[in-house]
Image (tube, grey):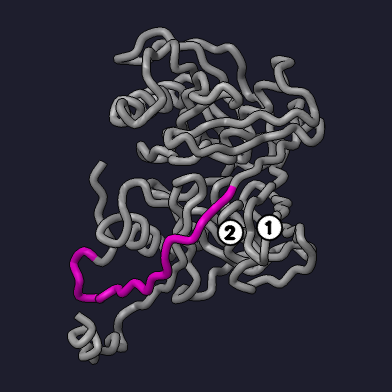
């Protein structure tokens, strides 16, 4: 085979767009980080930069997240220069439907990426980063082992319960109890026992169907508003919680977000919101850590680091811990004559 590949003599045509990425995963959830090929992304804040990308460069989101370069459950991140004096870099996030407000699995992977590649140089066994993200500053701390990032812990933005112990009728499901909480993004939380579903891959399509129906019903009947930033005020997904598979773990959850994406990880922003719920119910005290499983049995830990307020809400500062891995380095080509250059999606 080598003699055939050695004979390849081909150069990318000058009129093609070339985009470089590094691909990773956190707890099984993919992350495609765009590292080259983007024009300057204008804006003085992360939300302004995200808005510019959405209005001017959304074809790159669809081209990189959707088929044939991606898939319906692909997830992405854009690294930007910092927008605040103390931050090390900025970021915003991409998925099959559009742009999320926060992503914990991406923060974990990006911390590993920038430190292990030398993109950002920090000294010591536990280097710390400040990251400008759509909901605010995120504080990440890496645990190094032989110059490799073994684990990452990040302190999230203030997380709070928006609505608790609500009920509504969901078509095809029936009467349902739920909470809404914020961990950088808003989620509706319900219980697997109420839905009579198993939180594993055997009911994958049913989980997507239920997650989308619940999200749609909650959006219809319960407006969601962020206390400070209107662009952050929308319901991002549904999280279904249940019993853990392993006795020393606290629980298990599956997040269905965007347009029916299923998070393979426990969901960093989701477990942050769960920390707020458990604290409000008196089930999680400051300094206590709980370990939450994903659909793949991968885990994240979450701890209440501090108690605060956020606008009119009682809030917690959660710290989430997880680990990431590299999966590939890619150079994607966009042929201007390709009729499918902007991608397509089946769900």
**Would you say the residues marked 2 and 1 are in contact, meaning their CB atoms lie under 8 Å apart?**
yes
Q: Is residue 216 left or right of residue 100?
A: left
Location of residue 184 (image quadrant): top right
The relative height of residue 283 versus residue 71 in the rendered view (above or below) is: above
Of 38 and 144, nearer the camera is 144
Magenta highlight: main SS:
strand
Picture residue at 44% right of the left edge, 11% below the top? 194
> Label 2: few (<14), some or many (≥20) within 10 Å?
many
Q: For the view shown, which residue lies furthest in the top direction? A: 175
Magenta stretch bounds: 323-340
Q: Rounded to the nearest whole Å, what is the CA distance between mark 2 and mark 1?
A: 10 Å
Picture residue at 58% right of the left edge, 64% below the top? 113
Per the image, the residue denoted by label 1 is: 131
Q: Which numbered mark, 2 or 1, is in the foreground of this view?
A: 2
Q: If you read the primary sequence from the N terminus, does the residue marked by circle 2 or circle 1 appear first?
A: 2
Per the image, the residue denoted by label 2 is: 110
């Amino acid at each position: 085979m080598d003699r055939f590949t050695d004979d390849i003599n081909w150069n990318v045509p000058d009129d093609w767009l070339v985009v470089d990425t590094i691909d990773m995963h956190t707890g099984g959830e993919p992350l495609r980080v765009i590292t080259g090929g983007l024009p300057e992304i204008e804006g003085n804040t992360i939300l302004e930069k995200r808005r510019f990308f959405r209005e001017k460069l959304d074809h790159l989101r669809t081209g990189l997240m959707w088929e044939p370069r991606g898939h319906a459950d692909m997830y992405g991140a854009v690294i930007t220069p910092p927008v605040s004096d103390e931050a090390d870099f900025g970021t915003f996030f991409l998925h099959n439907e559009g742009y999320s407000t926060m992503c914990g699995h991406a923060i974990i992977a990006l911390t590993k990426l920038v430190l292990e590649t030398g993109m950002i140089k920090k000294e010591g066994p536990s280097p710390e980063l400040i990251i400008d993200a759509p909901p605010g500053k995120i504080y990440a701390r890496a645990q190094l082992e032989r110059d490799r990032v073994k684990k990452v812990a990040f302190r999230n933005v203030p997380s709070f319960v928006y609505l608790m112990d609500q009920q509504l009728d969901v078509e095809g499901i029936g009467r349902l109890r739920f909470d809404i909480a914020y961990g950088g993004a808003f989620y509706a939380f319900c219980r697997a026992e109420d839905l009579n579903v198993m939180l594993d891959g055997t009911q994958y399509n049913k989980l997507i169907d239920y997650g989308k129906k619940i999200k749609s019903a909650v959006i219809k009947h319960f407006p969601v508003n962020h206390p400070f930033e209107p662009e952050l005020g929308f319901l991002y997904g549904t999280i279904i919680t249940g019993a853990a598979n392993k006795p020393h773990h606290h629980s298990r959850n599956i997040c269905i977000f965007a347009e029916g994406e299923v998070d393979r990880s426990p969901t960093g922003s989701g477990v942050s919101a769960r920390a707020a719920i458990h604290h409000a119910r008196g089930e999680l005290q400051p300094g206590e850590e709980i370990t939450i499983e994903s659909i793949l049995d991968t885990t994240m830990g979450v701890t209440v680091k501090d108690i605060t307020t956020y606008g009119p809400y009682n809030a917690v500062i959660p710290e989430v811990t997880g680990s990431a891995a590299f999966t590939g380095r890619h150079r994607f080509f966009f042929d201007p004559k390709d009729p499918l250059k902007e991608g397509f999606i089946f769900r």
